[in-house]
Each structure stands twice: as structure tokens, then as C-alpha cells.
Image (spheres, helix red, strand yellow):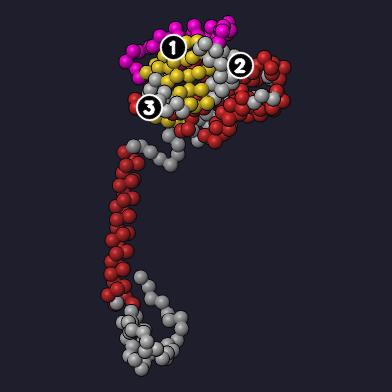
Amino acid sequence: MYDLKPILKPVDIELPTCMYPMKHIIGVTSSSQPPVASNSTEDLPEIQVLASKQEKILKQLAELREQLDSMRTGLKLCNKPAQPSAAVSTISQSASTKQLVKKIEPINLSYLHDFVVNASPENIPYGLLALQKLWFSRLNLTVECFTHSTISKLSEEAINFQSIITSHKPSDEKLPCIKVTLIWKNVGTYTEMITSPTAYVPICGEVNILRFLSRCGPSEFNYERQEDVNEVDSILDACYLLINKQNVKDKKQILKTLSSKLGKTPSFGGTDISLCDIAATSAIKQVQKALAKDINPNITKLITRVSAAVGI
């Protein structure tokens, strides 16, 4: 601690008698004389206590810094981003950002429940099939299909999809499992997932169902752990609108937005297939009859790539 020179010269002030007196912290005064500054503030007991506390805090901070440095050394960390290794998995990201490395974490079994999905045969939820393929070595997503009385006949495309998704055989029966009951029902474009039959609070829209499942499934496929999560959300929102907008002009504008975000890159997820690629492929396949002339070559390449990878 260091001394400060007095800012104001001592002034004789007549104090009112209606107030109770207090002991002066600095200097020694009398009722008739102005306060006199001490020659050294370090000699005051109050200052010595503060200095002692400060010294103790500085010592604790120094010890904490040493502990952090020791932990950093033990974990072999540095200020630069860690290099990928066999113990980590690369999460797919938008092409506008670099890849982010995340550790593979155990799946939280408390999130895994049986779900019911109501979908129209005209709006096939291809995203379920994509997740089933991508999670093959980490989680078993089994699907059982039924047809509601509102559907008189399934389309050939729906029958083919049903055949593929129900014939899935798990790679390991010991892996965690999500059981989905898919009911073909006249719900239009608003595919819905029922997470609680008693409460009946549906999650509407295939894109939102994919969002929900990405949080329940393997951590390396959870898009919310990426650095560019806001950009991913904007792409997923565009996919949702592409399916559910009724006006064809609106659909064309949204498709144009997706094309702009994709640019000349092979996919939204870079080298790996991301949730954006799955959502975009499923959405575009559902509207391709109305927008066939507006799908550019790079979007077509994306759909072909994803379809081949997940068996759509």
C-alpha cells in the first residue's frame, strides 16, 4: 500500500450537536482543532488488516494458478485448439466454419422412450431413416409401421420407405434403443411426434422431430454442440418452412435461400453428413414435384449424396 497526499487542506468545521460523534479513522483530532493526518497510513490497524487480507488473497490466487497450470500440463492442453485423435469424433458442421472436435459421450438412457410419429404418406419422414443409418453403431432406432383409417391406400414411395425402415437389423442388440411407432395418418405436412400418450403434447414438423432426437441420441450428432449453432438453426428453420409453406412462390424463395447457404460446397456438413443435410434432403424430396425446375445442380448433388449414404 502507498501513501496519498491530502487533497484538501484541513478546515475547521463546527459540527452540529444533533449528531452523535464518531471516532476519526485517519489522524487525531479534538473538538476544537482540525484533523491532523497521520505521517504513515500503514501504521493504522485498519490498513494493516486490509493489507494482510490482500496478501492472503494474492497468495490464494497464486496457488490456484499453479493448480490450473498443473491440470493443463496433465491434460496436455495448450492455448491452441486440440488436434483430432482416435478418442474424439468430428461433428459435421456448416461449410462456412471449420470442423469442431467433440468427445464421444455415453448416451443418457433416461432420454430414450418409445415414441409415436404420425405422418402423411405424401410427406414421408426420410429423416428417421437417415438417423437410423447414421446411428447404426451407437444406437438402435427401430420403427414399426401402421396405417390409420384416414388413409385408404399407401403410395408406392411410402410402401418402399416402410419396407426399408422396418427391415433394419441392429448391429448390436446390447446397444441403447429408441422404439418408434410410425402411423400413416392424414396429418398433411405437419408430421407430429407424440412423446407422452397421456399428456398428448405433440412435436410438430419433421425438422423439430429431428431436433428432438438429435438431443436424445449420440452426443457427436447433437448439432447444439457446434460453434455455428445459430446458422444450423436458421437452415433447419428454412427446411421446416419449405415443407409447410402453402404458397409455391414462398417455397421457391426458401429453396433459393437454402441454395445460397449451401453455395458451391458439397453439403452443409462439410465432409460428413450433418443434421442440416438430412433435413434439407427430406424437405426437398417432399416438395420436388412442385419445385423440380427450381432445384439447381448443387442441390441435386447434395440430395444424391445423402440419399446414397443413408439408403433413401
From the image, tell me which residue sits under label 1: 144
Mark found first going from the N terminus, 2 or 3? 3
Magenta stretch holds residue 35: no
- Considering the image in quadrants, where does the C terminus appear? top right
**Residue at the image point whose x is 45% and y is 86% from the top:** 9
Please name the residue that numbered disc 2 is placed on: 285
At mark 1, the secondary structure is strand
Q: Residue at x 36, y 84 (%)?
A: 19
Calculate the distance from the C-alpha at mark 2 to the C-alpha at mark 3: 30 Å
Residue corresponding to mark 3 = 111
Residue 214 placed where, x, y %? 46, 26
Within 10 Å of disc 2 (Cα), the crowding (few <14, some 14-19, many 20+) is: some
Query: Start and end of the magenta stretch?
Result: 151-176
Most foreground residue, 154 or 225: 154
User: How many discs mark residues in the rendered view?
Assistant: 3
Q: In the image, is residue 109 above or below residue 54?
A: above
Q: Secondary structure at mark 3?
A: helix
* Residue ranking furthest to the front: 149
Q: Quadrant of residue 155?
A: top right
Q: Amino acid at mark 2?
A: Lys
Q: Nearer the viewer, residue 155 or 38?
A: 155
Residue drawn 72% across and 25% down? Answer: 249
Amino acid bearing label 3: Tyr
* Element assignment for label 2: helix
| Towards the viewer: 79 or 21 | 21
Residue kind at label 1, given as amino acid type: Glu
At 31% from the left and 68% from the top, the residue drawn is: 50
Image coordinates of residue 228 in percent, x first then y, are: 53, 35
